Image (spheres, rainbow, N blue to C red):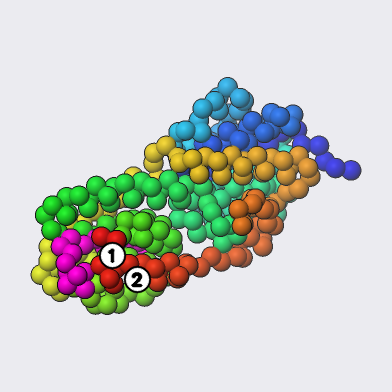
Amino acid sequence: MEKKIRRIGVLTSGGDSPGMNAAIRAVVRTSISCGIDCVGIRRGWQGLINSDFIPLNGENVRHIQSRGGTILYTARSEEFMTEKGREKAVSTCKMLGLDGIVAIGGDGTFRGALELSRLGIPVMGIPATIDNDIGCTNYTIGFDTACNTAIECIDKLRDTMQSHERCSVVEVMGRNAGFLALYVGIAVGATSVLVPERELDFQNDVIVRIQNSRLAGITHFMVVVAEGASSAITIGEMIRDSIGMDPRVTVLGHIQRGGSPSGRDRETATRMGYCSVRAFAEGRENNIIGTQEGGIVEIPIEEALAMKKHLQMDRYHILEAMSSSGAGK
């Protein structure tokens, strides 16, 4: 006999990303349409341990899809990584009468969800990270907004770099993945993009490209660095030592996480939130919601966590073609 789902919880965990609020809203409104109560767990897995919750309804999620961040707050929890911490979390689920948890976040969030599922609490995961580095899905909530934010900032930097005929080195997020850096680099016509997936050859990847651009008549240069590839400060110093140019270094940092989410992030988050609740209502559980070939898919959580996503090197080849000819500047 199919289990009746009466109440679910929703939480956001790990780094915040634009679109999380849209996903929360979709989870709540879909729950209402399915006759399911919804409880918001504040501050991620730590909030589940501490029984930090708020009942959610149509009123308190009204219009939140346009807001950045997450109304449920987010945190990382060392305690949840322990057996005792997870037992406390399960006790909270039982006390609140939760029949499942929708966990919105990245890889660490899903690993926590997997551990909870092994203790008998059904889960569904929604991928939300600006790095777009979750292997089981083509797209993660927040990537588009973060890219647009970085592009807007770099476009403004280029205006002053062009006026002063300077080199700018810009560091963007991406500790373990270069998806954001490469996308942004192509969009802004960067002279060079450095990503963690590609071993740095400073002379060829940076200096030769600057020299070739200068020979093509370009007098201002843009180097985009993913934080996992190197430090923008270090790259700037290396450029100065190598060719005597005095680069201006900008670290965009957490500004990339903020701001009103783009239309794509709002729409994708809404579809994912809807599908996560419908899965519970229809008797499916312990899956990650993802996008593949434009459609929404469900992947078993253990299988999803084993998947890897590789940087599309064809995009890197496009970048090389643009910069080698001095085009796009």
Residue at the location (57% across, 36% down)? 24
Note whether 177 is above or below 162 in the view shown: below
Quadrant position of residue 190: bottom left
Answer yes or no: is residue 2 visible.
Answer: yes
Q: Amino acid at mark 1?
A: Ala
Quadrant position of residue 93: top right
Please name whichever residue, 48 or 204, is drawn nearer the observer in this view of the structure: 204
Q: Dividing the image into 4 quarters, which one contains the N terminus?
A: top right
Question: Horizontally, is 199 left or right of 83 in the view?
Answer: left
Dot 1 corresponds to which residue?
327
Q: Are marks 2 and 1 in contact (CB under 8 Å)?
A: yes
Q: SS for tag 2? A: helix
Disc 2 to disc 1, how far (Cα)? 8 Å
Circle 2 residues within 10 Å: few <14, some 14–19, many ≥20: few
Outermost residue toward the right in this view? 1
Give the magenta part as a residue range: 212-230
Residue at the location (60% across, 65% down)? 307
Position in image of residue 85 (x %, y %): 59, 48
Position in image of residue 256 (x %, y %): 37, 47
Dot 2 corresponds to which residue?
321
Q: Amino acid at mark 2?
A: Ala
Q: Of callouts 2 and 1, which one flags the residue occurring earlier in the amino acid sequence?
A: 2
Q: Dividing the image into 4 quarters, which one contains the C terminus?
A: bottom left
Position in image of residue 274 (x %, y %): 65, 39
